[in-house]
Image (cartoon, grey):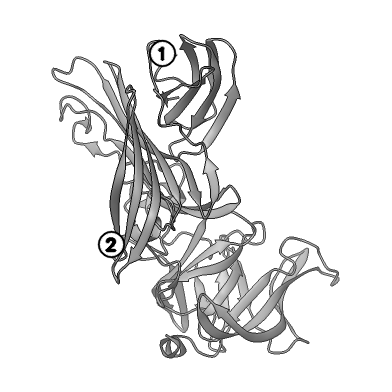
Amino acid sequence: MLIALSVSGQSYRPVWIGMERAFAETSGPGRMYSLVLDSVQISGTDTTWFNYFNFNDSVSHFSGCGYLGGDECNQLNRPSWTGRGIRPMSNGNVQFHNSVGETLDFLLPETATDTGWFYADGEQRFGLMLIGSDTVNLLGVLDSARFYQVVHVDLQGSIINSSLHEAPFTICKSLGLVEFFQVDSFPAVLRRLRMIGDAEQQIGLHIITDASIHDYQIGDEVQYSHFEYSALPEMHSGYHLKETILSRAETDTTVIYSLEFELFQEGSTQMSSGLNTRVYSKTDTVAKIPFESFSGVVRSMYQVDHCGSLLWHYDFDPDNRWYTCPYGPCWTAPVNGYGPNPVSSAYHIIGVGSGHDFSQHFLPEPWGGLQYVSHSTYITYFAKNGIPCGTATSVDISETSKENGITISPIPSNGQFMVRANSAIQRVDVFDPQGRSISGVGARGTNMELDLGDRPDGMYAVHVLFQNGSRVNRMVMIAH
């Protein structure tokens, strides 16, 4: 590894063509930022590299374009977090450009007595100051590093105590740029970023596999709730599943778990349990990192605080498309009679498990009405390394009964629902499609109102706990 690195990066070069790198915010939970220098443009003696210029984007990543629009909605030479382009200089320095074309000329000082000024306007100046060098172990790679800090001053040289002042800027001899900040809207926007993975060198977070998603130790537990729903006619069903890890074994290509499971079918009074084996592949790739999120339209990766542990979420929306046909929208009855394309999404919590959400309107034969179907799987609770997180489900009690029936109406709704029950309600909890709790309220009596009007369109899980200890689960749909 070190031999390969010594060839790919030398003399503290910050960036190079072919770099494939993932960065993340350092100030707390945030999303992943990609750097893939995949295009070179030469004009005279000037050479410019672009981030994701050649990426095969089929979906617009600009607000206002929606799912329609021409080539202007799919341009890839727009500013990303790194700005319009990156220009390497013959002296080893590098130029970035913000979204309005201003140049950030990073002149890297060689001594602590110099400051390399890289940006100035009518009110302020920004520079880099060398504060030291040392050997570091970054993502398992031993490398030499130079540590810089951003200096932010006014035109008289007085320090401006902004969030950018003293921000780290670190370059390694082999790995290049490893600490940086967002520059596309510089200096108005700042996100301090640190490298979390490199696909070129295959270090750090650079790939998601089934085994990395399902990464457990003995004693870990995961609970799932699955719901299926249809309207016109109205039908619903579901189950709750708890899995507890008993043993773990590995081969070069797989991770094998033995586990104990408990399964409760909604509407039943019986719980089934037993032993099972799960095998997850280390080589089957769910996603390669880095990638662009395109405002989350296609896929995105972000951190969530789960009971004090920061875990990465990877969301994938494979079917969120809407295409035109020669005679109008493809889902109209004269064309195919099925209805709009399905809306589906999958989410993965790295180290915990996966869930999904699917819904579709369609016109059943003989096109007498618009029917709606959906099914969703949520992770409602998990325990890793002895730390519990979420809302555990009691899977050994009846989830529905004649005495504890409920109705929720209207469905779909603009976000306001009425819950009516046959027995006294103790508490109502609502979960979004990623299984995150978005509302939890205590209740008295048999009726209550839910107001989710500020939530985006989609399916939400409603868990009703009765005062007698039993539960009922329903799915509701918001459509503004």
Of labels 1 and 2, the one closer to you: 1
Considering only vertical position in the picture, is 150 above or below 132? above
Q: Can you tell which mark lies on residue 393?
A: none
Q: Which residue is mark 2?
A: 284
Residue positioned 65% across, 58% down in the render: 27
- The quarter in which the C terminus is drawn is top left
- The quarter in which the N terminus is drawn is bottom left
Depth check, front residue: 99 or 330: 330
- Helix, strand, or loop for circle 2? loop
Residue 234 in view of the camera:
yes
Considering only vertical position in the picture, is 263 above or below 75? above
Residue 371, quarter of the rendered image: top left
Cα distance in 3D space between marks 1 and 2: 44 Å
Q: Are marks 1 and 2 in contact (CB under 8 Å)?
A: no
Judged left or right of residue 451, residue 163 is right
Judged left or right of residue 128, residue 457 is left
In the rendered image, residue 8, in percent from the top left (x then y), is placed at 43, 86
Q: Which residue is mark 1?
A: 405
Residue type at mark 2? Asp
